[in-house]
Amino acid sequence: MSYEVKLDIFEGPLDLLLYLIRKNELDIYNIPMALVTEQYLAHLEMMKALNLDLAGEYLVLAATLIHIKSRLLLPVEEGQGEGEEETDPRAELVRQLLEYQAFKEVALNLDKRKLLDRDVFKRIQPVEEVPEEPEDPMVEVSLFELIEAFKKVVERMDKEELLEIDTERISLSDRINEILEELSQQKSLSFTDVLKASRTRKSIVYTLLAILELMKMRVIRAYQADPFGPIRIFPAVEESNDG
Amino acid sequence: MDDLRAVVEALVFASEIPLSVDRLKDVLAEPDRKAILEILQDIELEYRQRSGGLCLMEVAGGYQFRTKTDYAPWIKKLRGIRPVPLSPAAMETLSVVAYRQPVTRQEIEKIRGVDVSGSLKGILEKKLIRIVGRKNVPGKPIMYGTTKRFLEVFDLKDLSELPTLREITEMEE
């Protein structure tokens, strides 16, 4: 039997914070930041000691707590009399906590309902029988055919390439420039043709990376006429009308 | 009348999905919606009173016979299943989707304060939620909403039957 780590029960930093508020019987609208921050950090230490994966979110909230605490310590600037009530540095945190608490309650309530396949059951739908007649002839492949197909694939690969350890060095920028070069000569390129030009796996990867990079830079655009149809690459039209 | 009642009972029993009043109306060629509803309520009452193993439940916009909760242990034994409960994390994510739909992952994460991609994937695979579109903001994030299956599993007639969310805006003085 494995040990259950009690800290695992927290569903996240907000949950932990709510737990601390409840445990200390604190007023959620008037959270004593010093106390809560101290206990929160102590829990994080404990989780660290137990080698639990400390999700980044816990640290973010820790930083938020410390930030709020420090802001509470600062003297309130004068001359801002009107806005003072609203600028309680805890307000946003309280709002977040209340919202989260509400959803947590809802989740518990939902779980109490008569759940299908846990509390109540309906008739099982008959398992669809596999139709015997329309057997797909395409699926019929013998072992020999498989081996044959595999051989073909291996043959297609460049054998020398397989042996060579340090393959030709391709640089991403070279590939980008090559594609741009091709595009300047032709108005558009077919995605498959561009990829086909590359022989090795590595160069295919670089080509794809280059295309993605160009799209990110908004230098080229890719279009597809219909789902699963061929993809074509076009140079992006300069939309920044300077003139 | 008694005859129609028996037909309704048979139809609900034979239907694979919760049978809606509209569908019953079509099949029976009975124009009176109210009459059908009355029959359904009558059957529901009868099953409740006769202390049998079944009850008629209104879920996901229709009616369905389901076993009573008391007999769950036997059915689990019969089917040899051990239901895997949704984790609290999944339940929380599901709740946010249910109340805030259509909602994006980022919006859920803001409320829950944690990464929700795992729990989202889980309830998506269980078909409790589905992708309903993309939000028209930078990045076009995917928006999620609950499914009919969600209503079926959680014994809800429709989304309006969800228990009300406790007022969050109590803060305002």
Image (tube, rainbow, N blue to C red):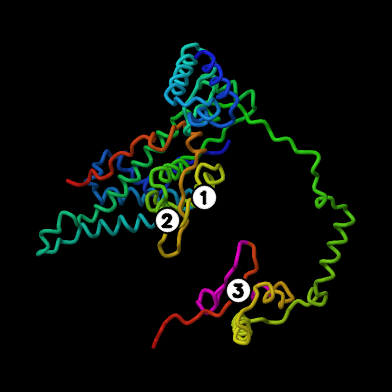
Which residue, given by chain and number where applicable, does mark 3 sit on?
A209
Amino acid at dot 2: Gln
- Is A83 situated above or below A199? above
Quarter of the image with the C terminus of chain A is bottom left
Cα–Cα gap, marks 2 and 1: 13 Å
Residue B106 circle label? 2
User: Would you identify the image quadrant in which residue A192 lies?
Assistant: bottom right
- Compare residues B132 and B81 and report the one nearer the observer: B132
In the rendered view, does A161 fall on the left or right side of A208? Answer: right
User: Would you identify the image quadrant in which residue A242 lies?
Assistant: bottom left
- Is B58 situated above or below A230? above
Q: Chain of mark 3?
A: A
Which residue, given by chain and number where applicable, does mark 1 sit on?
B118
| Residue at 57% from the left image edge and 78% from the top image edge | A234
Cα–Cα gap, marks 3 and 2: 27 Å
The secondary element bearing badge 1 is classed as helix
Amino acid at dot 3: Leu
The secondary element bearing badge 2 is classed as helix
| Residue at 15% from the left image edge and 59% from the top image edge | A83
**Quick one: label 1, few (<14), some, or many (20+) residues within 10 Å?**
few
Q: Is residue A115 visible?
A: no
